[in-house]
Image (spheres, helix red, strand yellow):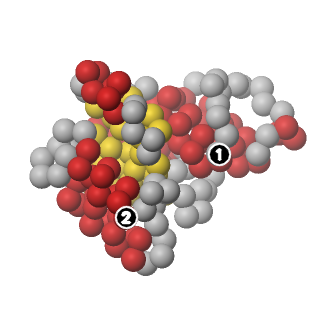
């Protein structure tokens, strides 16, 4: 499964979480660009924006050295308001406040449930809401890209 120019910028300062999450997402077909902090992520985002190939989705941790997740979101949103954000944080106290920002599509509390993150990514990339990822989808009734994505995910995560 390919998402063409639909790439994910994954921002996480914990190397083990960054690698395992990126590997899992790549295994099911997403193209993942990794950054270990907000400064690096912003640099990558700006480079892609200047090349005319903006990143559509940023999945970010909140508490990181150098530039934190909230400042990263504010900077990227200032540059391109169409960018969608998925926030991953170990601090559940932040969830309610973060969900008030319209550019933040979802907040996940660590440890991550990869199925939930993938469901949110599919929703963003296909512009379709998925409350549940069913196993017996009828290909004629839904967007082909979403069908293929869900079938691939089910093979790897079930």
Residue that mark 1 sits on: 127
Residue 94, image x, y percentages? 27, 27
Please identify the residue farthest to the top as the structure is shown: 93
Asked whether the beta carbons under mark 1 and mark 2 sit within 8 Å of each other, the answer is no
- Mark nearer the N terminus (1 vs 2): 2
- Count residues near mark 2 (Cα–Cα under 10 Å), then give few for <14, some for 14-19, many for 20+: few
At 27% from the left and 66% from the top, the residue drawn is 43
Please identify the residue farthest to the bottom as the structure is shown: 51
Is 128 in front, or is 18? Answer: 128
Residue 25, image x, y percentages? 47, 44
Q: Nearer the viewer, mark 1 or mark 2?
A: 2
Residue that mark 2 sits on: 79
At 39% from the left and 39% from the top, the residue drawn is 101
Distance in Å between CA atoms under marks 1 and 2:
22 Å
Q: In this view, does 59 lie to the left or right of 40?
A: right
Q: Image quadrant of residue 149?
A: top right
At 42% from the left and 62% from the top, the residue drawn is 80
Q: Is residue 8 left or right of residue 130?
A: left
């Amino acid at each position: 499964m390919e998402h063409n120019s639909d790439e994910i910028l994954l921002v996480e300062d914990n190397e083990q979480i960054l690698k395992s999450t990126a590997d899992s997402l790549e295994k099911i077909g997403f193209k993942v660009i990794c950054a270990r902090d907000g400064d690096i992520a912003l640099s990558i985002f700006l480079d892609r924006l200047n090349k005319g190939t903006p990143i559509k989705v940023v999945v970010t941790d909140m508490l990181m050295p150098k530039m934190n997740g909230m400042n990263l979101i504010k900077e990227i949103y200032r540059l391109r308001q169409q960018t969608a954000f998925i926030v991953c944080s170990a601090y559940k106290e932040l969830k309610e406040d973060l969900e008030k920002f319209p550019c933040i599509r979802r907040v996940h509390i660590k440890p991550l449930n990869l199925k939930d993150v993938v469901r949110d990514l599919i929703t963003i990339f296909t512009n379709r809401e998925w409350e549940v990822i069913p196993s017996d989808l009828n290909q004629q009734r839904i967007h082909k890209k979403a069908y293929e994505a869900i079938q691939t995910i089910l093979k790897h995560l079930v």
